[in-house]
Image: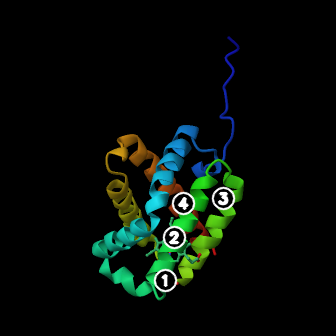
Amino acid sequence: MTGQIHSPPFTTPLSHTTAMNPLTIQAVQHSWAQVKPIEVQAAALFYRELFSRDPALQPLFKGDMAAQGHKLMQMIGAAVAKLHDLPTLLPVLQALGRRHQGYGVIDRHYATVGAALLATLALGLGPQFTPEVEAAWTEVYLLLANVMQTAAATA
Ligand code: HEM
């Protein structure tokens, strides 16, 4: 024994700069592949869940909701596909977060959107929405939301 004090391997305090657990990535990618074929219904369900939780969010959306739903699903799909490559994904999310500030989105809206997204996945996946899948999506959504919010706050 040398009595040496070990320092941590790195000192970065931001958890999102470290790689994600491959099992989390796998659970999210696998379950998203099951949502993909029903993405039109899933998007509609998502907005229903969202506006039932907070009707005051509806006026923030100015455009066609079918087109908006498509953009949302595309972006979630793109993010899910890049979870193993955070250096590529993070700048995309940061830009998205800054744009959201311009749409009138504030911090507490992210929790409502997260709850609506998880409820949508629960309904869309049925019994395949296991506790593991729920935990994996919770972690991934928190990552996306955290990066978007931080970028908006420092814009
Ligand atoms: C992971 C979280 C989110 C993702 C992936 C996401 C994705 C998107 C995408 C792809 C767009 C299309 C425009 C663009 O690319 O800038 C968009 C627009 C928008 N999002 Fe989000 N979003 C998220 C969170 C939120 C939250 C928390 C809110 C709060 C209610 C929100 C409200 C809006 C609004 C109001 C628009 C503009 C609609 C319009 O142009 O009429 N989003 N979002």
Which callout, 2 or 3, points at the residue further toward the start of the chain?
Answer: 2
Which residue is identified by label 4? 144
Q: Residue at x 56, y 67 (%)?
A: 74
Queried on whether the Cβ of the residue with tag 4 lies below 8 angstroms from ligand 1, the answer reads: yes
Q: Residue extending furthest top? A: 1
**Corner quadrant of residue 92:** bottom right
Label 2 sits on residue: 72
Amino acid type, residue under disc 1 in the picture: Gly
Distance of label 4 from label 1 (alpha carbons): 18 Å
Dividing the image into 4 quarters, which one contains the N terminus? Answer: top right
Q: Is residue 4 above or below residue 66?
A: above
Write the residue at 56% across / 60% down: 77
Circle 4: residue type: Leu
Q: Please state which of the two labelled residues, at mark 2 or mark 1, is closer to the viewer.
A: 2
Q: Residues within 10 Å of mark 2 (few under 14, many from 20)?
A: some
Residue 111 placement (x, y as % from top left): 40, 65
Q: Which quadrant of the figure has residue 113?
A: bottom left
Identify the amino acid type marked 3: Leu
Q: Residues within 10 Å of mark 4 (few under 14, many from 20)?
A: many
Task: Point out the frontmost of discs 3 and 1.
Answer: 3
Task: Give the residue drawn at x 44%, y 69%.
Answer: 40
Element at label 3: helix
- The residue beneath circle 1 is 104
The residue lying toward the viewer, choosing from 40 and 56, is 40
Q: Is mark 2 within 8 Å of ligand 1?
A: yes
Horizontal and vertical percent position of residue 82: 64, 54
Element on which disc 1 rests: loop
Q: Which mark is residue 88?
A: none
- Residue at mark 3: 89
Which is more N-terminal, label 1 or label 4? 1
